[in-house]
Image (cartoon, helix red, strand yellow):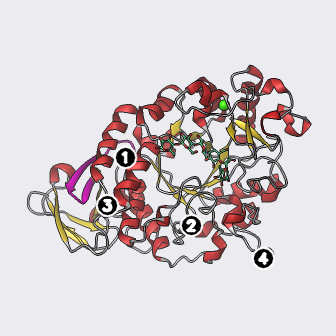
Amino acid sequence: LDNNSARSASVYQVITDRFARPSSVSSTCNASDRKYCGGTYSALIEKLDYIKGMGFDTVWISPIVENIGGTTGLGEAYHGYWTLDADKTNDNFGTADDLKSLSTALHNKGMYLMVDVVVNHVAATSGGSFTPNADYGPFSSSDNYHKFCWIENYNNQTNVEQCWLGDDQVALVDLATDTDTVKNYWNNWVKELVSNYTLDSVRIDTVKHVQKDFFPNFVSSAGVFIQGEVLNGDASYVGAYQKDAQVNPFNYPAYYPLVRGFNQTSGDLTELVEMVSTIKSNFNDPTLLGNFLNNHDNPRFESTVTDLSLIKNAHAYPFVTDGIPYGYYGSEAGFTGGEDPANREPLWSSNYDTSSTMYQYFASLNSARKAAGNASDTFYTNQMTVSPLSSSSILIAKSPLISVLSNSGSSASDASVTVQSSASGWSGNTEVIDAISCETLTTDGSGNLAVTVKGGLPRVFIASSQKGSVCSGSST
Ligand code: ABC
Ligand code: CA
C-alpha cells in the first residue's frame, strides 16, 4: 500500500499469540500470567474470514523477530517486542514459510498484511550491566548501543532518544540509531522484510525514542505505507513526526479527548471538537493518521464503561473521521481487560462469534465507510468538519458520510437535533439511511435533516443513492 491506497484501508490489530491457536493446543491462557498461549500464523490463516466478515481488510500482527527466550520478572516475550536477533524469526508463531503463507492467504482474499517493527531497542534481563554477544545477531558489538541510562525525563528529548526504556527486570537496550552501521542495517533489513514477506504496510514501535532524521531513509527503504507510534497526547509534538520524519502517527492526540468525551454521560465533547482543529493545524495531513479506541497498551475502553451506547459511539469515531481506522481484536467480542497485560485476552475464549452485537456493529461501520469511499473520490482525502450539535452530541461531516455521535447514554430520552444542509451538502428531499439502525429519513425542502437520537445511539448517515451494501447484511 502507498499513502493513497492506505487511506481506504481498515485495519484489525491482533496480538499474534492471542488471536488464534491450533485446535490441538488446549492449555489455559490467563492474560495475567504474561506467558505464550500458543497463537500462530497458521491458525490466524484459518480465521481470515472472521476478520473480513467485519469489513476489515488489513491485519496488523505482532513483531515477527526472534525474542529473548525463557521467563523474566515481566513474564515471557509473547507480545514480540523483546527483540533478540532481528535476523531470525520468532518460532513460537510458526516458521518463516508460515508467515509467507499468511501473506499469500491475505492477498488471495484481497486483504493486506501489516507487520510491527521495533528499531529502537533489543531486550535483556541483565539491566544496566548488559553486554551484547553473538545471540544479538547483527547487533553483537557494544558500539551498536547507547550507553546505559534509564529514561527519566520525558520532557528532555535527548534523554527520550538516547536513554533506555524498560527496567531492571527487562531492559530495552537502546540501539545507536544515530550510527551509520545501525542505520544501514535497519534500512536494508526493512527492505528485505517487506520483500520477503510481501508486506503491504508497516507499524513502527517507539518512534519518539529514535531521532527524527533516522526515519526518512527508513521509510523510503520500506517502500510501503508506515504508521508510527508516537505515544504522546500533544498534537504539536506528534505532528512534527509527520512533518519532519515522514512517519504517519497513530492519533494519540485525539485518543485522550475521545476517551474522556465518551466514557461518561457528563463527558466534555468540546475538548474533542477543539482537538480536531488543533490536529488540522499541527499535521501536514490528518487524513493519514491512524485512529483507534483500543490497543494493546491501554486499558480497553470497555474496562471502565459498561453503557452500550457510550461504547458504540466511542467505537464509531475512528471509522467516521479523517484517517485510517484501527480495530483491536476482542472489541467485537465484548472483552473488558484493563491495563496491560489484562487487555490481551485470548480470542478463542469468545468462540469467534460472528453474531455478537459488536461484531455486527463493526461490520456496519466498515460498510458505511466503504460506501462513502466508493461514492466519492474525495471522501478519504478531504478533511472533515466537526462541530457541537447539543451539549451531548457532535456532528462529524465528512461528505458523503455524515455522523451524529452522542454521549447521552442508553437511558437518555429521545433528543432532537438538526443536521443543516450547509454542513451535510444534502439538497432538499434527499433520502438518507442510517447505517447503524438502517432507518431511512428524508431531508426537508431546504436539505436540512431532523434527527432523533434514540437511546443515545450513534447515527451514521449516507444518502440512500450512495449506500452501496450498507444495511444489505453483507460487508463487502
Ligand atoms: C511490561 C509488562 C507490563 C508492565 C510494563 C511496565 O512492562 O508487560 O505489564 O506494566 C512491550 C510490551 C509490554 C511491556 C513493555 C516493556 O514492552 O508490549 O507489555 O510492558 O517491557 C510500545 C509498544 C508496547 C511495547 C513497547 C516496547 C513499546 O506499543 O507494546 O511494550 O517495545 C512508552 C513508550 C511507548 C511504549 C510504551 C509501552 O511506553 O514511549 O513507545 N509502547 C507516557 C510517556 C510515553 C510512555 C507512556 C507509557 O507514558 O510519555 O512515552 O510510552 O509508559 C498522555 C501523555 C503521554 C503519556 C500518557 C500516559 O499520557 O501525553 O506522554 O505517556 O497524556
Ligand atoms: Ca533510542
Q: Quadrant of the N terminus?
A: top right
Q: Label 1 CB, ligand 1: below 8 Å?
A: no
Q: Disc 4 versus disc 3: distance between alpha carbons?
A: 47 Å
Q: Say which label, 1 or 3, has the lower sequence index.
A: 1
Is 384 magenta? The answer is yes
Tell me residue 379's x, y (percent): 36, 48
* Residue behind mark 2: 330
In front of the other: 414 or 154: 154
Is label 2 in a helix, a strand or a loop?
loop
* Residue behind mark 1: 377
Mark 3 vs mark 2: in front: 2
Tell me residue 85's x, y (percent): 82, 41
**Residue 26 disc label:** 4
Q: Residue at x 75, y 26 (%)?
A: 147
Is label 3 in a helix, a strand or a loop?
helix
Q: Residue at x 91, y 36 (%)?
A: 134
Is label 4 in a helix, a strand or a loop?
loop
Q: Label 3 CB, ligand 1: below 8 Å?
A: no
Q: Alpha-carbon neighbours of circle 2 within 10 Å: few (<14), some, or many (≥20)? A: many
Instruction: Indicate left or right for 291 with 122 as reference.
Output: left
Range of residues picked out in magenta = 379-395
Disc 1 marks which amino acid? Asp
Q: Say which label, 3 or 2, has the lower sequence index.
A: 2
Disc 2 marks which amino acid? Gly
**Residue 466 disc label:** 3
Is 167 magenta? The answer is no
